[in-house]
Amino acid sequence: MPESVKLLGLGVAVPGHVIHQAEAAALAESLFSDRIRGFSHLVPVFSNSGIRRRYSVRPLSWFLDQHGWADRMQAYSEGARALFADAATRAINQAGLEPADIDTIVTISSTGFATPSIEALVAHEMGFRADIQRVPVFGLGCAGGVSGLGIAARLAAGRPGTKVLMVAIELCSLAFRLDEPSNVSVVASALFGDGAAACVLSADEGGVAAVESTGEHLFPDTVDLMGWRVDDHGQGIILAQSLPHFVGSQVGPAIAGILARNGIELADIDRFVCHPGGAKVLDAVESSLSLGQGTLNDEREVLAAYGNMSSPTVLFVLDRAVRAGLPERSAMLALGPGFTASCVTLRKAA
Protein backbone atom coordinates (compact mmCIF):
# COMPACT_ATOMS: atom_id res chain seq x y z
CA MET A 1 0.00 0.00 0.00
CA PRO A 2 1.30 3.54 -0.70
CA GLU A 3 1.02 4.44 2.97
CA SER A 4 1.62 1.94 5.78
CA VAL A 5 -1.80 1.24 7.31
CA LYS A 6 -1.87 -0.28 10.77
CA LEU A 7 -4.48 -2.42 12.47
CA LEU A 8 -4.91 -0.55 15.75
CA GLY A 9 -7.78 -2.47 17.33
CA LEU A 10 -9.95 -5.55 16.81
CA GLY A 11 -13.18 -6.58 18.54
CA VAL A 12 -15.64 -9.45 18.13
CA ALA A 13 -19.17 -9.95 19.45
CA VAL A 14 -22.01 -12.50 19.38
CA PRO A 15 -25.66 -12.24 20.45
CA GLY A 16 -27.00 -13.81 23.62
CA HIS A 17 -28.97 -16.82 22.37
CA VAL A 18 -26.92 -20.03 22.14
CA ILE A 19 -27.97 -22.79 19.75
CA HIS A 20 -26.26 -26.10 20.42
CA GLN A 21 -25.88 -28.33 17.40
CA ALA A 22 -27.96 -31.14 18.91
CA GLU A 23 -30.82 -28.67 19.41
CA ALA A 24 -30.57 -27.48 15.81
CA ALA A 25 -30.61 -31.08 14.57
CA ALA A 26 -33.68 -31.89 16.64
CA LEU A 27 -35.49 -28.80 15.37
CA ALA A 28 -34.66 -29.58 11.74
CA GLU A 29 -35.94 -33.13 12.18
CA SER A 30 -39.21 -31.94 13.70
CA LEU A 31 -39.74 -29.42 10.89
CA PHE A 32 -38.50 -31.27 7.82
CA SER A 33 -38.36 -35.05 8.39
CA ASP A 34 -41.81 -35.64 6.88
CA ARG A 35 -41.44 -32.94 4.20
CA ILE A 36 -38.10 -33.87 2.60
CA ARG A 37 -37.75 -37.21 0.89
CA GLY A 38 -34.66 -39.02 2.17
CA PHE A 39 -34.27 -36.67 5.13
CA SER A 40 -32.42 -39.37 7.10
CA HIS A 41 -29.54 -39.10 4.64
CA LEU A 42 -29.16 -35.41 5.55
CA VAL A 43 -29.00 -35.88 9.32
CA PRO A 44 -25.20 -36.53 9.41
CA VAL A 45 -24.56 -32.96 8.17
CA PHE A 46 -25.13 -31.75 11.73
CA SER A 47 -22.52 -34.04 13.28
CA ASN A 48 -20.09 -33.82 10.34
CA SER A 49 -20.13 -30.02 10.16
CA GLY A 50 -17.51 -29.63 12.88
CA ILE A 51 -19.82 -27.21 14.73
CA ARG A 52 -20.68 -27.56 18.42
CA ARG A 53 -22.73 -24.41 18.90
CA ARG A 54 -23.77 -21.11 17.31
CA TYR A 55 -25.31 -17.85 18.43
CA SER A 56 -28.53 -16.19 17.33
CA VAL A 57 -30.29 -12.85 17.80
CA ARG A 58 -33.54 -14.75 18.36
CA PRO A 59 -34.24 -17.80 20.55
CA LEU A 60 -34.71 -21.19 18.91
CA SER A 61 -38.47 -21.01 19.49
CA TRP A 62 -38.67 -17.99 17.12
CA PHE A 63 -37.85 -20.24 14.19
CA LEU A 64 -40.92 -22.42 14.77
CA ASP A 65 -43.15 -19.75 13.24
CA GLN A 66 -43.41 -18.33 9.73
CA HIS A 67 -41.79 -14.91 9.32
CA GLY A 68 -41.97 -12.41 6.48
CA TRP A 69 -39.76 -9.47 5.61
CA ALA A 70 -41.19 -7.21 8.33
CA ASP A 71 -40.38 -9.68 11.13
CA ARG A 72 -36.99 -10.51 9.72
CA MET A 73 -35.89 -6.92 9.20
CA GLN A 74 -37.12 -5.82 12.62
CA ALA A 75 -35.00 -8.59 14.12
CA TYR A 76 -32.12 -7.54 11.85
CA SER A 77 -32.27 -3.88 12.84
CA GLU A 78 -32.42 -4.64 16.56
CA GLY A 79 -29.76 -7.35 16.47
CA ALA A 80 -27.36 -5.60 14.12
CA ARG A 81 -27.44 -2.36 16.10
CA ALA A 82 -26.57 -4.15 19.33
CA LEU A 83 -23.79 -6.19 17.74
CA PHE A 84 -22.36 -3.15 15.95
CA ALA A 85 -22.12 -1.25 19.22
CA ASP A 86 -20.56 -4.21 21.04
CA ALA A 87 -17.90 -5.10 18.45
CA ALA A 88 -17.08 -1.48 17.56
CA THR A 89 -16.68 -0.47 21.21
CA ARG A 90 -14.26 -3.35 21.79
CA ALA A 91 -12.17 -2.43 18.74
CA ILE A 92 -12.11 1.29 19.55
CA ASN A 93 -11.15 0.61 23.16
CA GLN A 94 -8.34 -1.74 22.10
CA ALA A 95 -7.04 1.00 19.80
CA GLY A 96 -6.93 3.38 22.77
CA LEU A 97 -9.41 5.73 21.10
CA GLU A 98 -12.85 7.23 21.64
CA PRO A 99 -15.77 7.01 19.18
CA ALA A 100 -15.32 10.73 18.45
CA ASP A 101 -11.84 9.93 17.08
CA ILE A 102 -13.29 7.85 14.21
CA ASP A 103 -13.37 9.65 10.86
CA THR A 104 -14.84 6.99 8.54
CA ILE A 105 -17.03 3.92 9.10
CA VAL A 106 -17.23 1.01 6.65
CA THR A 107 -20.17 -1.27 7.45
CA ILE A 108 -20.26 -4.71 5.80
CA SER A 109 -23.46 -6.78 5.80
CA SER A 110 -25.40 -9.01 3.40
CA THR A 111 -28.04 -10.58 5.63
CA GLY A 112 -30.41 -7.66 6.15
CA PHE A 113 -31.43 -4.19 5.06
CA ALA A 114 -31.70 -0.96 7.01
CA THR A 115 -32.14 2.58 5.71
CA PRO A 116 -30.62 4.61 7.30
CA SER A 117 -27.84 2.03 7.49
CA ILE A 118 -26.76 0.52 10.79
CA GLU A 119 -23.88 2.90 11.55
CA ALA A 120 -26.25 5.87 11.19
CA LEU A 121 -28.80 4.25 13.52
CA VAL A 122 -26.21 3.90 16.30
CA ALA A 123 -24.19 7.07 15.60
CA HIS A 124 -25.69 9.22 18.37
CA GLU A 125 -25.62 6.60 21.11
CA MET A 126 -22.07 5.58 20.13
CA GLY A 127 -20.80 9.16 20.19
CA PHE A 128 -19.57 9.46 16.60
CA ARG A 129 -19.01 12.97 15.25
CA ALA A 130 -21.56 14.67 13.01
CA ASP A 131 -18.99 14.86 10.18
CA ILE A 132 -18.35 11.09 10.17
CA GLN A 133 -18.03 9.59 6.68
CA ARG A 134 -20.17 6.47 6.14
CA VAL A 135 -19.52 3.67 3.65
CA PRO A 136 -22.19 0.93 3.92
CA VAL A 137 -21.40 -2.09 1.69
CA PHE A 138 -23.88 -4.83 0.79
CA GLY A 139 -23.55 -8.09 -1.18
CA LEU A 140 -20.03 -9.34 -0.43
CA GLY A 141 -21.28 -12.29 1.63
CA CYS A 142 -18.64 -14.48 3.25
CA ALA A 143 -15.84 -12.58 1.48
CA GLY A 144 -16.91 -9.34 3.18
CA GLY A 145 -14.63 -9.58 6.20
CA VAL A 146 -11.48 -9.58 4.07
CA SER A 147 -12.82 -7.37 1.26
CA GLY A 148 -14.13 -4.91 3.85
CA LEU A 149 -10.75 -4.79 5.57
CA GLY A 150 -9.21 -4.05 2.18
CA ILE A 151 -11.67 -1.23 1.49
CA ALA A 152 -11.06 0.28 4.93
CA ALA A 153 -7.27 0.02 4.52
CA ARG A 154 -7.35 1.81 1.17
CA LEU A 155 -9.49 4.58 2.65
CA ALA A 156 -7.05 4.95 5.54
CA ALA A 157 -4.09 5.03 3.15
CA GLY A 158 -5.74 7.74 1.08
CA ARG A 159 -6.07 10.08 4.06
CA PRO A 160 -3.10 9.51 6.39
CA GLY A 161 -3.83 10.14 10.04
CA THR A 162 -7.57 9.50 9.81
CA LYS A 163 -9.09 6.65 11.77
CA VAL A 164 -11.26 4.17 9.85
CA LEU A 165 -13.63 1.78 11.61
CA MET A 166 -14.73 -1.33 9.70
CA VAL A 167 -17.60 -3.38 11.13
CA ALA A 168 -18.83 -6.66 9.61
CA ILE A 169 -22.25 -7.78 10.88
CA GLU A 170 -24.19 -10.82 9.71
CA LEU A 171 -27.40 -12.30 11.08
CA CYS A 172 -27.48 -15.45 8.97
CA SER A 173 -30.06 -17.14 11.21
CA LEU A 174 -32.77 -14.74 10.02
CA ALA A 175 -32.69 -16.33 6.57
CA PHE A 176 -33.98 -19.66 7.94
CA ARG A 177 -37.07 -20.63 5.95
CA LEU A 178 -39.90 -22.88 7.16
CA ASP A 179 -41.51 -22.63 3.73
CA GLU A 180 -38.52 -24.15 1.91
CA PRO A 181 -38.20 -27.85 2.74
CA SER A 182 -35.04 -28.53 0.74
CA ASN A 183 -31.64 -30.15 1.15
CA VAL A 184 -29.95 -26.73 0.98
CA SER A 185 -32.21 -25.41 3.77
CA VAL A 186 -31.18 -28.29 6.03
CA VAL A 187 -27.48 -27.76 5.27
CA ALA A 188 -27.85 -24.04 6.02
CA SER A 189 -29.60 -24.80 9.31
CA ALA A 190 -26.53 -26.85 10.30
CA LEU A 191 -23.92 -24.24 9.39
CA PHE A 192 -24.85 -20.62 9.91
CA GLY A 193 -24.82 -18.36 12.97
CA ASP A 194 -24.86 -14.67 13.89
CA GLY A 195 -22.01 -12.39 14.90
CA ALA A 196 -20.03 -9.20 14.31
CA ALA A 197 -16.42 -8.08 14.24
CA ALA A 198 -14.78 -4.66 14.02
CA CYS A 199 -11.36 -3.26 13.15
CA VAL A 200 -9.82 0.18 13.55
CA LEU A 201 -7.26 1.12 10.89
CA SER A 202 -5.03 4.13 10.36
CA ALA A 203 -1.90 5.13 8.47
CA ASP A 204 -0.29 5.75 11.82
CA GLU A 205 2.29 4.40 14.20
CA GLY A 206 1.86 1.39 16.47
CA GLY A 207 -0.85 -1.18 16.08
CA VAL A 208 -0.83 -4.98 16.11
CA ALA A 209 -0.17 -5.47 12.37
CA ALA A 210 0.45 -3.54 9.16
CA VAL A 211 -1.71 -4.05 6.07
CA GLU A 212 0.75 -4.88 3.31
CA SER A 213 -1.46 -5.63 0.29
CA THR A 214 -5.05 -6.26 -0.78
CA GLY A 215 -6.55 -8.03 -3.76
CA GLU A 216 -9.50 -9.97 -5.16
CA HIS A 217 -10.18 -12.51 -7.88
CA LEU A 218 -13.60 -12.78 -9.51
CA PHE A 219 -14.09 -16.18 -11.15
CA PRO A 220 -16.02 -16.04 -14.45
CA ASP A 221 -19.37 -17.82 -14.85
CA THR A 222 -19.67 -18.78 -11.18
CA VAL A 223 -22.59 -16.66 -9.92
CA ASP A 224 -24.60 -19.83 -9.20
CA LEU A 225 -22.07 -21.23 -6.71
CA MET A 226 -23.15 -19.12 -3.72
CA GLY A 227 -25.48 -16.26 -2.87
CA TRP A 228 -28.99 -15.23 -1.85
CA ARG A 229 -32.21 -15.70 -3.78
CA VAL A 230 -34.74 -13.05 -2.76
CA ASP A 231 -38.52 -13.57 -2.89
CA ASP A 232 -41.66 -12.31 -1.13
CA HIS A 233 -40.88 -14.13 2.13
CA GLY A 234 -37.18 -13.46 2.59
CA GLN A 235 -33.75 -14.58 1.44
CA GLY A 236 -33.13 -18.15 0.30
CA ILE A 237 -29.60 -19.47 0.26
CA ILE A 238 -27.82 -20.55 -2.93
CA LEU A 239 -25.10 -23.08 -2.09
CA ALA A 240 -23.83 -25.44 -4.78
CA GLN A 241 -22.76 -28.97 -3.84
CA SER A 242 -19.76 -28.53 -6.12
CA LEU A 243 -18.32 -25.70 -3.99
CA PRO A 244 -15.66 -27.72 -2.10
CA HIS A 245 -14.43 -29.28 -5.35
CA PHE A 246 -14.25 -25.85 -6.99
CA VAL A 247 -12.33 -24.42 -4.03
CA GLY A 248 -9.90 -27.34 -4.08
CA SER A 249 -9.08 -26.94 -7.75
CA GLN A 250 -9.30 -23.18 -8.34
CA VAL A 251 -8.55 -21.15 -5.23
CA GLY A 252 -4.83 -21.90 -4.94
CA PRO A 253 -3.92 -20.46 -8.37
CA ALA A 254 -6.20 -17.45 -7.77
CA ILE A 255 -4.53 -16.61 -4.45
CA ALA A 256 -1.09 -17.11 -6.00
CA GLY A 257 -2.10 -14.60 -8.69
CA ILE A 258 -3.31 -12.03 -6.16
CA LEU A 259 -0.07 -12.34 -4.21
CA ALA A 260 2.08 -12.19 -7.35
CA ARG A 261 0.47 -8.89 -8.38
CA ASN A 262 1.80 -7.53 -5.09
CA GLY A 263 5.25 -9.04 -5.48
CA ILE A 264 4.63 -11.88 -3.01
CA GLU A 265 4.85 -15.66 -3.44
CA LEU A 266 2.84 -18.34 -1.65
CA ALA A 267 6.06 -19.52 -0.02
CA ASP A 268 6.49 -16.08 1.57
CA ILE A 269 3.34 -16.53 3.69
CA ASP A 270 4.09 -17.73 7.22
CA ARG A 271 0.45 -18.18 8.18
CA PHE A 272 -2.92 -18.17 6.45
CA VAL A 273 -5.94 -16.75 8.30
CA CYS A 274 -8.94 -18.19 6.46
CA HIS A 275 -12.69 -17.81 6.57
CA PRO A 276 -14.00 -21.15 7.91
CA GLY A 277 -16.97 -21.63 5.58
CA GLY A 278 -17.37 -25.27 6.56
CA ALA A 279 -15.38 -28.40 7.35
CA LYS A 280 -15.22 -29.57 3.72
CA VAL A 281 -14.30 -26.11 2.48
CA LEU A 282 -11.43 -25.88 4.97
CA ASP A 283 -10.14 -29.27 3.80
CA ALA A 284 -10.34 -27.99 0.22
CA VAL A 285 -8.48 -24.76 1.06
CA GLU A 286 -5.67 -26.72 2.73
CA SER A 287 -5.40 -28.91 -0.35
CA SER A 288 -5.54 -26.04 -2.83
CA LEU A 289 -2.84 -24.05 -1.02
CA SER A 290 -0.70 -27.19 -0.44
CA LEU A 291 -0.93 -26.72 3.32
CA GLY A 292 -0.41 -29.64 5.66
CA GLN A 293 -3.51 -31.34 7.01
CA GLY A 294 -4.51 -29.58 10.23
CA THR A 295 -2.78 -26.30 9.35
CA LEU A 296 -6.12 -24.49 9.63
CA ASN A 297 -7.10 -25.94 13.01
CA ASP A 298 -7.60 -22.48 14.50
CA GLU A 299 -10.20 -21.96 11.80
CA ARG A 300 -11.81 -25.27 12.74
CA GLU A 301 -11.96 -24.20 16.39
CA VAL A 302 -13.69 -20.94 15.47
CA LEU A 303 -16.12 -22.87 13.27
CA ALA A 304 -16.86 -25.28 16.12
CA ALA A 305 -17.50 -22.50 18.63
CA TYR A 306 -19.47 -20.05 16.45
CA GLY A 307 -20.47 -21.72 13.19
CA ASN A 308 -20.20 -19.89 9.87
CA MET A 309 -21.20 -16.27 10.59
CA SER A 310 -20.35 -15.21 7.03
CA SER A 311 -18.24 -12.03 6.77
CA PRO A 312 -17.14 -11.56 10.42
CA THR A 313 -15.94 -15.15 10.90
CA VAL A 314 -12.46 -14.64 9.43
CA LEU A 315 -11.96 -11.74 11.86
CA PHE A 316 -12.73 -14.09 14.75
CA VAL A 317 -9.87 -16.23 13.41
CA LEU A 318 -7.66 -13.14 13.13
CA ASP A 319 -8.49 -12.20 16.72
CA ARG A 320 -7.37 -15.65 17.83
CA ALA A 321 -4.18 -15.36 15.75
CA VAL A 322 -3.35 -11.91 17.14
CA ARG A 323 -3.74 -13.16 20.68
CA ALA A 324 -1.39 -16.06 19.94
CA GLY A 325 1.12 -13.77 18.20
CA LEU A 326 1.26 -13.11 14.47
CA PRO A 327 4.30 -14.30 12.48
CA GLU A 328 6.26 -12.01 10.17
CA ARG A 329 3.74 -12.25 7.31
CA SER A 330 0.15 -13.52 7.29
CA ALA A 331 -2.42 -13.75 4.53
CA MET A 332 -6.13 -13.43 5.21
CA LEU A 333 -8.36 -15.33 2.79
CA ALA A 334 -12.13 -15.43 2.34
CA LEU A 335 -14.42 -16.71 -0.39
CA GLY A 336 -17.83 -15.33 -1.23
CA PRO A 337 -20.54 -14.89 -3.83
CA GLY A 338 -19.50 -13.70 -7.22
CA PHE A 339 -17.68 -16.19 -6.92
CA THR A 340 -14.85 -14.20 -5.33
CA ALA A 341 -11.60 -14.88 -3.53
CA SER A 342 -10.39 -11.98 -1.40
CA CYS A 343 -6.92 -11.70 0.14
CA VAL A 344 -5.20 -9.23 2.47
CA THR A 345 -1.61 -9.69 3.62
CA LEU A 346 -0.43 -8.45 7.00
CA ARG A 347 3.07 -7.82 8.33
CA LYS A 348 3.88 -8.12 12.00
CA ALA A 349 3.95 -4.70 13.63
CA ALA A 350 7.46 -3.43 14.27
Image (cartoon, rainbow, N blue to C red):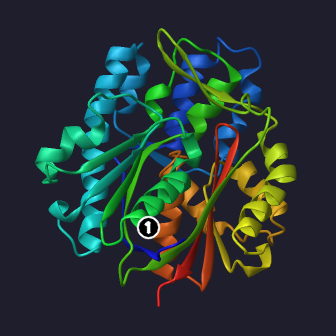
Q: Is residue 149 above or below residue 290?
A: above
What residue is shown at x 27% (from left), y 43% (from top)?
119
Residue at (54% x, 11% y) in the render: 179
Q: Residue furthest top?
A: 232
Instruction: Identify the image quadrant of residue 212.
Output: bottom right
Q: Is residue 134 above or below residue 43?
A: below
Question: Quadrant of residue 246 in the image?
Answer: top right
Pick whichever, 3 or 147, lies toward us.
3
User: x, y (%) of residue 263?
Assistant: 73, 74
Q: Is residue 343 visible?
A: no
Residue, disc 1: 157
Report x, y in % for residue 7: 41, 72
Find numbered disc 1 in the image and state the secondary structure of the residue it sits on: helix
- Give, as a three-letter code, the residue at label 1: Ala
- Across and down, in percent, residue 12 comes to 37, 59
- Visible residue check, residue 103: yes
